[in-house]
Image (cartoon, rainbow, N blue to C red):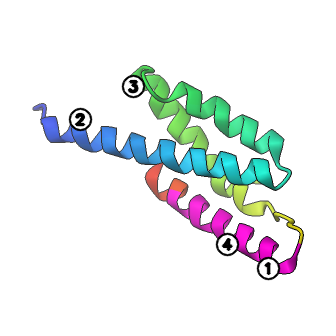
Amino acid sequence: MSFDASDERDSGDRLDAVCEVLKRLIDLLSRFGQGDKADWLAERLAKLPGGSAENGAAVLAELHGAVLGMGGLMDLQLQGGSLEESDGANAELDRLGDQLFELTR
């Protein structure tokens, strides 16, 4: 097996994208009364940068399962002060959840 520097760069770009999506999810969930889910995601985010590759892979697998799993992100219904606010928040949650699912495959 040969080492390709572009593989490491692609992996770093992917990890950066995962971290960005997690930050946005944490913010969204915190603003809409889902502090426990936001805290859980923040704990995983803290384990990603600078950790071992093995640990990073385990965290990515855990995040992947948390998107669609029973009681996962896609099961949440965010409630805002108005129907429009709730709809917007849930659309954003769906978008970010889809991104996280794809990035953690």
Look at the image and give the residue range highlighted in magenta: 82-99
The disc at residue 91 is 4
Q: Earlier in the sequence, mark 2 or mark 1?
A: 2
Q: Which residue is drawn at 57% across and 27% down?
A: 46
The residue singled out by tag 3 in the image is 53
Which of discs 1 and 4 lies nearer the camera? The answer is 1
**Circle 2: element type:** helix
**Circle 3: element type:** helix
Tell me how far mark 3 sits from mark 1, CA to CA: 42 Å
Tell me how far mark 1 sits from mark 4, CA to CA: 10 Å
Contact, mark 2 vs mark 4 (Cβ under 8 Å): no
Contact, mark 2 vs mark 3 (Cβ under 8 Å): no
Q: In this view, does 66 lie above or below 83?
A: above
Query: Residue 89's x, y, as percent?
Result: 73, 67
Q: Is residue 98 above or below residue 36?
A: below
Q: What residue type is labelled 2?
A: Glu
Query: Residue 69's x, y, as percent?
Result: 70, 53
**Circle 1: element type:** helix
Tell me how far mark 2 sits from mark 4, CA to CA: 33 Å
Q: In this view, does 48 lie above or below 82?
A: above
Query: Can residue 70 be found in the magenta stretch?
Result: no
